[in-house]
Amino acid sequence: MDTVGDYVVGGREIGPVVTGFSERASEMSGWLTLGVPADAYSSGVMAFYNGLGMIPADLLAWAGIAKRLRKYSEIVRAVTLPTFFATRLRDDTGLVKAVSSLVLIVFEGGYVGAQIVAAGTLLRVLTGIEMWVGIVAGGVIVVGYTMLGGYFAVAWSDYFQGAIILAAFAVLPIIAYTTWGLPFGELAAMDNGASLTSVTGGATGWAALFGIISYAAIGLGVPGNPHIMVRFMGIDRVENVRTAAVVAQLFMFVAYVGAALVGLYALVQFGDLANTDNAMPMVTLELLPGALAGVVLAAALAAMMSSADSQLLVATSAVVEDVYHGFLNEQATEEQLVRYSRYVTLAIGFASIGFAYVARETPIYTLVLDYAWGGLGASLGPLLIAALWWKRVTVAGAVASMVTGTTTMILWTQWTTILGEATIEGLHPALSGLLTVYGLLPAFVLSALVLVVVSLATTPPDREALAEDFDVMRQPLSAVVEDDYATDGGTPEPKAVTELDNVRGHVADSDYWDEQ
């Protein structure tokens, strides 16, 4: 790897099948392998709703974001979302890049910690070791190969690990069925069987409505999570986006259904578990012989590592490319940036291990959704969509949106602590449901509203520059430039990228941009 672009987006040379697997494996993580089965163990068939928002949201992201982001990020040679935001908004103040970088460092670092907690939980079940030992072991492995390999290592490891986890969740429910039969009859016979087999979890009225909405709202996090978006930036050709999208959707459907079924089988077969996160490993150990169980549980561990390394890489790029290169040393060489990227990966990785130790008792499902996925989705999602599709967005609107999304998401997770559970239960059912709905929904909506209102209230961007930007995103590159230069997928000069014309001479007129 010669450039930071190679380190962060693999030099934009990752094929569609690897990209599709990598995009899904990086997002699904310990939340899918341990969290979704645990949710099914706790809530019953409602756990199938975990895919209710995620599948259409991811499909829309591939259809409406992938090509535009891939084109524009290449033409301005941006390899991180903060650089993309600053370039697209022509922010000479550096405020957009600074705020978005801070958001990434905090939430992606927390995300890495959540995956390490999941890895530690699984290792504790498998070996009986202390939780802190599992956390340290998992963290060191993730930090090591991310630091040495960058995006190439991450994408290819995600591919192989994704294939394993896909096979695991496809095969394990089949083996469970041949051994135990379908779980639904036994679920219905349990003391709380009516709620476990109800599509509303036994809830009615407003509670049922907001319960389903909470599951659907999970999908709102897709456009704001950079470890997913960087897959769009790193794919080799725009024409391959469609193939990668198909791979990703097939992966997602099989994995979500399989994970929920595993959780239901755990509930039927094992009854009360001290830790619901143990549902998936318990089913695996019960059904399979030792060697095969090891392969399946290795798949779970692999999915956790695949997410952690992706998120660690995004946090690293925010520090090195967007903070160090963007503010502290604009003349840094590619060799320096790659070297510092490895140092920062090491530092953030060990900080995440510390966070994982502190948060080790928090359920994986909650830890990921409330403190990582939701924060990124609410703070960056509306801005990314607007930057790609709305010409009127301004720097002030972008900053206000990110701040609003972050603070709202944090606040919404604390209503029970602030008001008390008894107080919330005593409110009107509609208000009680709103306060307990998944916080990403109100945070995303408020972030989007603030973005629109503040942007409309502030000075509009230059129309000529906007027309140029949107022409780039809408057309193949061959319709925009005529020069025939090679691109190395590297980073732009920090100031030059604020004017598109200044970098056109360094951009390839290649078949990357053929959309047929």
Image: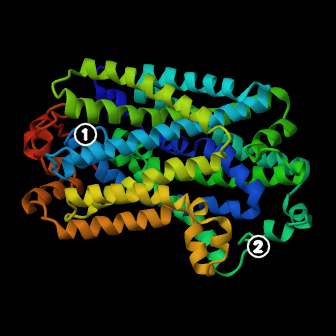
Seen from the viewer's position, the closer of residues 461 and 182 is 461
**Neighbour tally class for label 2: few under 14, some 14-19, many 20 plus, Cα within 10 Å:** some
Q: CA distance from mark 1 to mark 2?
A: 49 Å
In the rendered image, is residue 116 in sight?
no
Seen from the viewer's position, the closer of residues 106 and 231 is 106
Tell me what residue is drawn at x 65 percent, y 44 percent.
Answer: 362
Q: Position of residue 431 (x, y in %)?
A: 57, 77
Residue 248 horizontal side relative to residue 454, left or right: right
Residue identified by numbered label 2: 202
Residue identified by numbered label 1: 78
Identify the secondary structure beneath mark 1.
loop
Tell me what residue is drawn at x 72 percent, y 74 percent.
Answer: 203
Identify the secondary structure beneath mark 2.
loop
The numbered disc on residue 294 is: none
Vertical relation: 491 (above or below) 136: below
In the rendered image, is residue 60 in sight?
yes
Vertical relation: 218 (above or below) 270: below
Tell me what residue is drawn at x 62 percent, y 76 percent.
Answer: 209
Q: Earlier in the sequence, mark 1 or mark 2?
A: 1
